Image (cartoon, rainbow, N blue to C red):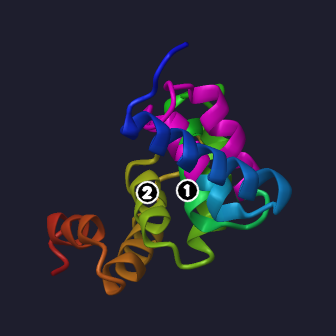
Amino acid sequence: MRRFSKDEKHAESVVRDFTKAAESQHHPAAMFHLGLCYDEGKLVEHDATRAAQWYRKAANQGYAPAQHALADCYARGDGVPKVIEDAVTWYTKAAEQSFAPSQAALGKMYEKGIGSVRKNLGFAIELYAHASHQGFPEATSNLRKLGLI
């Protein structure tokens, strides 16, 4: 019989608790954190497909961090096919909830004209400004690079 270390037992307990909350209570934060575990290979083996599945479950409940994480998956093609339009859709849903990382990511897409996104510097600046006002340093840096602050 295999003996588990204290850390392994703790990891199993954490994953079990997240899974219980995600599956039986439909708790979006638990779903998101399970996705993170699989995405980063922490407490469980890395599995990009399972990460995207958990992110999607939480994203469908309107959980902005999960919407952002799922958008990242689509932008990278990690666990799902690389589909920029789907990334834009999920970044937009999170940005509409004032989620600064999504505002900045979407701003970058509009600044650069990535994929099917038409370049729109004015909209990019607006998105960066919203994220910057929330203290998101990447957005502030992007505004600085554009010579706006």
Q: Which residues are magenta?
A: 33-58
Quarter occupied by residue 135: bottom left
Confirm or deny contact between disc 1 and disc 2 (CB under 8 A): yes
Q: Nearer the viewer, mark 1 or mark 2?
A: 1
Q: Amino acid at mark 1?
A: His
Identify the residue at image location x=48%, y=38%. 9
The secondary structure type at the circle numbered 2 is helix
Residue named by callout 1: 68
Q: Main secondary structure of the magenta part?
A: helix
Q: Nearer the viewer, residue 75 or 17?
A: 17
Identify the residue at image location x=23%, y=70%. 137
Quarter occupied by residue 40: top left
Q: Nearer the viewer, residue 87 or 31?
A: 31
Identify the residue at image location x=39%, y=55%. 108
Q: Is residue 147 left or right of residue 41?
A: left
Question: In the rendered view, would you say 122 is above or below 82?
Answer: below
Q: Amino acid at mark 2?
A: Ala
Residue named by callout 2: 105
- Give the x, y percent position of residue 34: 60, 46
